[in-house]
Image: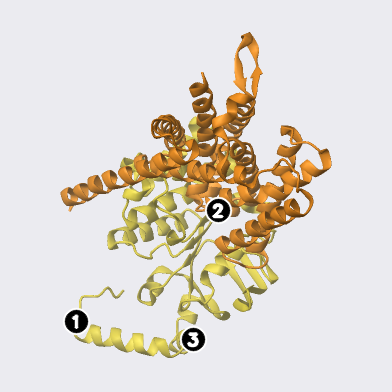
Amino acid sequence: MNDFYIIFTASLVAINCALMGSFLVMRRMVMIGDAISHAVLPGIFVAYYVSGSTASIPVLIGAALSGILATLMIEWLTAKARLQSDAAIGIAYTLLFAIGIVLISKFGANADLDQQCVLYGEIEYVSLWLQPIVGGLLLPQQAIILAIVCMVLIIAIAIGYRGLFLTTFDPNFALSTGVAVTFWHYFLMSGVSLTTVVSFESVGAILVIAFLSGPPAIAYLLTEDLKKMLILGCLIGISCSIGGYYAAKWLNVSVSGSISTVIGILFLITFVITSVQKSKLDVITS
Amino acid sequence: MSNPTIVEAHNLTVVYGRKPALWNVDFELPEKQVIGIMGPNGSGKSTLLKSIMGVVEPTSGFTKVYDQELSEVRDRVSYVPQRQDIDWDFPASVWDIVSMGRFQKRGLFKKLTAEDKDIITESLEKVNMLGFSKRQISQLSGGQQQRVFLARAIAQQGDLFLMDEPFAGVDIATEEMIISLLKEMKTAGKTLVIVHHDLHTAQSYFDHLVLLNTRLVASGPTQDVFTDQILTDTYGGKLTTIAKISQELENKEFPIRYK
């Protein structure tokens, strides 16, 4: 049952990240996920300090708020200070992460906050916190939160698909037709923030980035339709979770590390195969 | 006889960082004509279209369309951005792109109706791309991409079309197809404002010309402003070189298009 809990949790993270990551990849801003997953640290600490507990809800709220603060900061630095977006991301998240570290080392000497855990997660232990749901079924607490977020994201994408599609493909045209491009930017960023915050608690920041960028990038190589790319990205993420988990068990290594590695290898294989096919096609058509 | 004004700009200045892209530009454009916007690279042609379309905020001055704020008449104006600004490897089909032209009328949340689909089909037919509607956009040639963009603008069913370099990097067949389509649209009462590069074709394509070099050099009927003096003012020394080369090529009967 433990196997199932871990794979189930990782798969939910994979789905959430693939849904958001597909849009981020097409907007060339995947690293914003990295930024958010680090920038949440001060928010987590402040929430912990104020509420006096590491209970999920206040921590999640604190994290989500500092995640959104990070996206606002990045947007401000790009728009007003005219920085390149990657430079803006670098400045914003290192600053926020550093503030978090400084706060913890100053006031949180005995805090139950582990900086390691922020980076690598603790997916091996999800089954320690089981929650009964309908029908006497037990599920990890993390998985329940992730499942709720997953439903929110699916509904948001179903409703906002056209807006996200239009503003991702051609923001200038969107502006010319009176579409509020900035609104859709923050619409997506709220989703990314939510996803990152609930995901990194279970799998760590590194795997969040791997899930945000890897499966969508693989799906992008394989399909020519954004909708198919979303679905395929989810399926690839789930497969990598299953494959990565059993590889970790077999080799007795970190689960997060193993899943990230599987994603990376799968990308390389897909890239080689599609490039070979493409060059064959070019020979035929030319 | 002069047509009523459709687009006007007053004291329009746009500054990126510290560098002005447009400086104190003033003009009025007549309705129901094919209007060319020309000038050397970096002379603010694209910026001009973008500020008319509200994509770029002017630093000072303003533009009006149909004597109103753009937001009042947005549904009558279609914009064709520069083809190179777009990621053509985006996972989308020709149909997906052209259907964007209907989003404004239908809103972002309602399903496209049968009428919308008819309009999209018709627009694709007009640019000879109906057979490609399921094609992924990365598999199109430059000319085909440009026709898809044109179809999207036609699907918007506006009266005023602002096009940023529709002839850049397209094949001759596409250029001829587009120009005959534009003339057809003009006959149907549409106004077309086109950023253009090629001086050779300017006289045959445009009824009215706006010549820019960050400042406005001239704006008026083509026969009045397409003069050696004004062109030299616009392009500076560069033009004399271009003119000499094309003269030389013509003398040697080099096969270049010269209308």
Q: Nearer the viewer, residue A250 or B2?
A: A250
Chain that is coloured orange in the picture: A
Give the answer, above or below, for where A53 lies relative to A138.
Answer: below
Instruction: Identify the residue shown where x is 27% and y is 49%.
Output: A275
Closer to us: B257 or A22: A22
Residue wearing tag 2: A171
Residue A41 position, x and y percent, is 68, 48
Residue at image location 43% in from the left, 91% down from the top? B237
Type of amino acid under label 3: Ile
Kindly identify which residue carries mark 3.
Answer: B230
Amino acid type assigned to the residue bearing label 2 in the image? Pro
Chain with colour yellow in the figure: B
Q: Which mark is residue B253?
A: 1
Label 1 secondary element: loop
**Disc 1 or disc 2, which is closer to the eye?**
2
Q: What residue sits 73% from the left and 38% below the top?
A: A59
